């Protein structure tokens, strides 16, 4: 039931698919997506529903050879915990929901098109501040804070500026590692008081795939081995791409003849 409206099977499946897309595209773990879709379908008298979710696919169907299955391919994912919270509020308060079916479809689709919660400037500032703070946390001083602040902020700005080219996430992270290494080395060359290791480590922290790795572990714990493997492999691949970019910048600097460390 959607408020006082009894949904048809087709309407239930359509809303369930949109709910899954919103959750998966905004950073939810696959176990949460499967549980939410199943709970929503059960609330609307679709007791025989089977849900299969991976980080890239949502599959809805039943064991009947007559009813069709529904498949959705997820080609991009981001992180927006506000949308996940809104979907949770929606699915746990179906009986008091006031919108009809058409209005609910429009509302859920609007969540798919929601722009990022923070502007590019705010994202770059957050990256800069966190980079500086991580540099100090790992033993740096005020010089390291300033250098990491500059490195993290400029790298994030550079990556956001390249978003229109639709690079794969692997190459995006490789470019981020390359930028971090280059800017950190320049800061160290300008002011030798900067500790290169602290600056690089601090600036790397905002780009590490912590959410992907955490979701992978949660999927493992929930028994979703395929999704756990996918997300953990994704996190490792992103970390490797960062390391490749960083190593390339350090190697280039070294081959040019400048000392990396005092």
Image (spheres, rainbow, N blue to C red):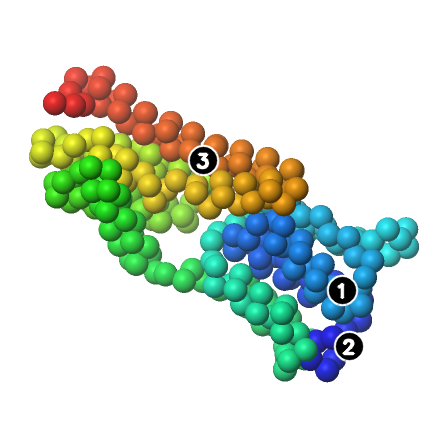
Secondary structure, mark 1, is helix
Q: CA distance from mark 3 to mark 2?
A: 45 Å
Q: Which residue is mark 1?
A: 42
Q: Residue at x 33, y 41 (%)?
A: 205
> In the figure, residue 56 lies in which quadrant?
top right
Q: Earlier in the sequence, mark 3 or mark 2?
A: 2
**In the picture provided, is 19 more to the left or to the right than 214?**
right
The image position of residue 71, as x and y in percent, is: 72, 51
> In the figure, residue 110 lies in which quadrant?
bottom right
> In the figure, residue 95 lies in which quadrant?
bottom right
Nearest to the observer: residue 37 or residue 255: 37
Q: CA distance from mark 3 to mark 1?
A: 37 Å
**In the picture provided, is 135 more to the left or to the right than 262?**
right
**In the picture provided, is 261 more to the left or to the right than 116?**
left
Look at discs 2 and 1 and give the one toward the viewer: 1
Residue 60 to residue 114: above or below:
above
Question: Mark 2 near mark 1, Cβ–Cβ under 8 Å?
Answer: no
Q: Which mark is residue 6?
A: 2
Secondary structure, mark 2, is loop
Q: Residue at x 74, y 75 (%)?
A: 1
The image position of residue 104, as x and y in percent, is: 63, 74
Residue 5 seen by the camera: yes
Q: Which residue is mark 3?
A: 238
Residue 168 seen by the camera: no
Q: Earlier in the sequence, mark 2 or mark 1?
A: 2
Secondary structure, mark 3, is helix
The image position of residue 256, as x and y in percent, is: 19, 19
Q: Residue at x 48, y 32 (%)?
A: 237
Q: Residues within 10 Å of mark 3 (few under 14, many from 20)?
A: many
């Amino acid at each position: 039931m959607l408020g006082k409206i009894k949904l048809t099977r087709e309407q239930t499946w359509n809303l369930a698919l949109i709910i899954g897309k919103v959750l998966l595209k905004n950073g939810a773990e696959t176990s949460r997506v499967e549980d939410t879709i199943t709970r929503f379908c059960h609330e609307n008298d679709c007791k025989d529903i089977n849900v299969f979710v991976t980080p890239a696919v949502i599959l809805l169907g039943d064991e009947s050879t007559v009813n069709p299955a529904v498949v959705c391919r997820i080609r991009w994912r981001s992180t927006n915990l506000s949308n996940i919270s809104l979907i949770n509020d929606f699915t746990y308060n179906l009986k008091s929901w006031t919108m009809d079916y058409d209005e609910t479809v429009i509302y859920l689709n609007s969540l798919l098109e929601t722009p990022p919660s923070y502007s590019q400037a705010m994202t770059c500032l957050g990256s800069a501040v966190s980079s500086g703070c991580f540099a100090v946390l790992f033993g740096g001083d005020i010089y390291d804070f300033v250098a990491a602040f500059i490195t993290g902020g400029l790298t994030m700005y550079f990556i956001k500026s390249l978003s229109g080219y639709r690079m794969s996430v692997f190459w995006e992270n490789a470019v981020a590692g390359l930028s971090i290494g280059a800017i950190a080395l320049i800061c160290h060359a300008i002011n030798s008081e900067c500790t290169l290791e602290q600056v690089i480590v601090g600036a790397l922290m905002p780009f590490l795939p912590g959410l992907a790795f955490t979701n992978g572990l949660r999927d493992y714990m929930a028994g979703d081995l395929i999704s756990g493997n996918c997300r953990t492999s994704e996190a490792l691949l992103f970390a490797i791409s960062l390391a490749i970019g960083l190593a390339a910048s350090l190697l280039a600097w070294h081959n040019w003849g400048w000392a990396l460390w005092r």
